[in-house]
Image (cartoon, grey):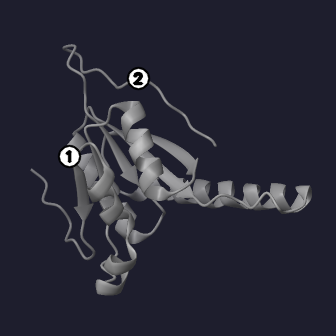
């Protein structure tokens, strides 16, 4: 598991700036979630942008396993590179790659960073997905802090 953490940013007057955890997979819905989280955090805030990946099977032989892990990291890094064009303003972004279940990983990171909230995008896949269970539903059921779900097709935010 690859993680990078640091203490919450402090505002110049000693007030702790908000830390918000955002689920991110590089798709448009998650980019929108990053934008919403950036607006909610404000210019002094910190976004911990979490890319969660499924574990690579240890049943693979060493060279194949190493290759699969490298491809996963490269895919995550490319997704993080696209964040530069997400329009997040002056907010601090801390990318993390976590292996495991998306909902559980986001909850663990939020607890470890004492995040104010968790923000995720919704693909709006309808009833079938809600019956099977989505990341946003699992978060709403299990999280110990507020969860913001940005619906699919959410229009751009108004700027003040």
Residue 94 x %, y %: 46, 39
Within 10 Å of the Cα at label 1, are there few (<14), some (14-19), or many (20+) other Cα atoms?
some
160 left or right, relative to 70: left
Please name which of the two marks, 1 or 2, marks the residue nearer to the observer.
2
* Residue depicted at 31% across the width and 70% down the height: 122
* Residue 144, horizontal then vertical, whole percent: 27, 43
- Is 55 on the left or on the right of 118, as rendered? right
The quarter of the rendered structure image containing the N terminus is top right
- The residue under the point 28% across, 75% down is 152
Give the residue pinned by disc 2: 7
Q: Nearer the viewer, residue 135 or 41?
A: 135
Quadrant position of residue 100: bottom right
Q: Which mark is residue 86?
A: none
* Residue on which the image places disc 1: 40
Name the secondary structure under disc 1.
Answer: helix
Q: Position of residue 28 (x, y in %)?
A: 39, 70
Instruction: Tell me the quarter of the picture where residue 139 sits.
Output: bottom left
Q: Earlier in the sequence, mark 1 or mark 2?
A: 2
Inspect this view and state whether residue 34 appears: yes
| Residues packed near mark 2 inside 10 Å, few (<14), some (14 to 19) or many (20 plus) | few
Q: Which residue is most to the top?
A: 14
């Amino acid at each position: 598991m690859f993680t990078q953490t640091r203490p919450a940013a402090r505002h110049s007057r000693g007030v702790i700036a908000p830390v918000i955890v955002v689920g991110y997979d590089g798709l448009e819905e998650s980019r929108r979630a990053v934008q919403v989280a950036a607006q909610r955090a404000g210019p002094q805030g910190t976004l911990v942008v979490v890319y969660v990946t499924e574990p690579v099977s240890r049943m693979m032989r060493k060279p194949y396993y190493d290759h699969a892990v490298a491809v996963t990291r490269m895919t995550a890094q490319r997704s993080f590179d696209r964040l530069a064009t997400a329009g997040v303003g002056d907010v601090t972004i801390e990318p993390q790659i976590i292996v495991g279940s998306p909902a559980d990983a986001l909850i663990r990171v939020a607890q470890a960073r004492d995040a104010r909230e968790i923000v995720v995008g919704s693909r709006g896949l309808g009833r079938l997905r809600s019956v099977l269970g989505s990341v946003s539903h699992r978060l709403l059921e299990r999280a110990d802090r507020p969860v913001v779900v940005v619906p699919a097709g959410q229009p751009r935010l108004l700027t003040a």
